[in-house]
Image (tube, rainbow, N blue to C red):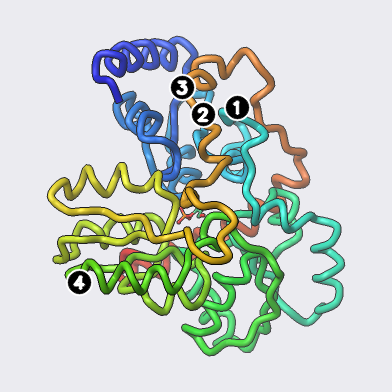
Amino acid sequence: MNSIDYKEKLRFVKNFLKSNDAKLIAHYYVNSEIQKLAEDSGGCVADSLQMAKYGTQQKESNIIIAGVKFMGETSKILNPEKNIYVLDKDATCSLDESCDVKSFQNFIDLHPDREVVVYANTSAKVKAISDWVVTSSIAIPLVENLASKGKKIIWAPDKYLGSYIEDQTGIDMVVWNGACIVHEEYKTLELKNLIAKLGDCEVLVHPESPRSVIQLADVVGSTTKLINASQTSKAKNIIVATDSGIFYQMKKLSPEKNFHEAPTEGKGATCKSCGRCPWMNMNTYQKLINIFNSDNEIHLDDETIHFAKKSINRMIEFEDRYYIKQKRVS
Ligand code: 13P
């Protein structure tokens, strides 16, 4: 990032946001320039759940989400009175795309005795036909809590996060067959080789990764949990199996450490330079400053908002109760 350019860009963005009564909220996976602009302009950078919750606390009438479509939709669901914009409406998520509402309704109908728990990486319409929405930070305690009440569970759409929850809790779920195209690419053998080569290292893995990669992890968790772990780790070398956009925050917190992308290349890989979500990559400065010139506003019908909000709010209430008890950062 060229610092002179950046100063000019920041000045422009600050004025732009102020004159449009807008706030910029970014996900940890967007490029470092957008993350920095969000931080320096008085907005925030956060994980998917914190992004939506943060929006509810802002006075501005326009919220700009730098991330992917489901994040904009979640923000709209929690802030229906505000105008919510995304930098590019075509920036989606393979998990969201894998789970269209019609097919998912048919799947639910096959298991009428089960509680429906969906990951935040789903469309607003899928959230609206589900009982619970969860993010990776709260999935395990929530599923455990439901199971302790004798509930049987449908989990969607991420099969890897689903199998991770099953492995951790011993709870059997009916799982939808979706995957994240970035995390699915991490390679076990190459990761083992990198661990052996580095020696003094710690491995941080997002639970959207395959089971054999998760098994090599020192820490498994949401983007927030991985960032915290990168800071508290005593290791000199940190290997990270999640989108490389996260390195901006990790390097900022621990400039003395060496960060390594978990390997994706090797036999069977479809994307040698991966570790990068193509949709997160669509969030650019040019799109930010032109946001009000094109059709970037998220619109959802009232019924979808009403029902999706119920499922999200149940998670938020559970999360508030859970963290008051546990005082745990997840
Ligand atoms: P977090 O909820 O951990 O931010 O993850 C969001 C996501 O899209 C992971 O691929």
Q: Which mark is residue 285?
A: 3
Of mark 2 and mark 3, the one earlier in the sequence is 2
Q: What residue do we see at 15% from left, 61% from top?
A: 236
Query: Residues under labels 3 and 1: Cα distance?
Result: 20 Å
Q: Please, what is the three-letter code of the amino acid marked with disc 4?
A: Gly
Q: Please, what is the three-letter code of the amino acid marked with disc 2?
A: Ile
Give the class, few, some or many, for how many residues have Cα within 10 Å of label 4's Cα (few <14, many ≥20): few
Q: Which residue carries the number 1 mark? A: 83
Q: What residue do we see at 47% from left, 17% from top?
A: 21
Q: Is residue 132 above or below residue 75?
A: below
Q: What residue do we see at 67% from left, 79% from top?
A: 153
* Residue 141 position within the rendered picture, expressed as x and y whole percent measured from the top left: 47, 75
Of mark 3 and mark 1, the one earlier in the sequence is 1
Q: Nearer the viewer, mark 4 or mark 1?
A: 4
Q: What residue do we see at 29% from left, 71% from top?
A: 195
Query: Quadrant location of the N terminus?
Result: top left
Of mark 4 and mark 3, the one earlier in the sequence is 4
Q: Are marks 4 and 1 in contact (CB under 8 Å)?
A: no
Query: Residues under labels 4 and 3: Cα distance?
Result: 39 Å
Could you tell me which secondary element the residue under label 1 belongs to? strand
Query: Residues under labels 2 and 3: Cα distance?
Result: 16 Å
Q: Is residue 323 left or right of residue 196?
A: right
Q: Which residue carries the number 4 mark? A: 199
Q: Please, what is the three-letter code of the amino acid marked with disc 1?
A: Asn
Q: Which mark is residue 52?
A: none
Query: Residues under labels 1 and 2: Cα distance?
Result: 6 Å
Q: Are marks 3 and 1 in contact (CB under 8 Å)?
A: no
* Residue 168 position within the rendered picture, expressed as x and y whole percent measured from the top left: 47, 83
Which of 242/264 is in front? 264
Q: Which mark is residue 63?
A: 2
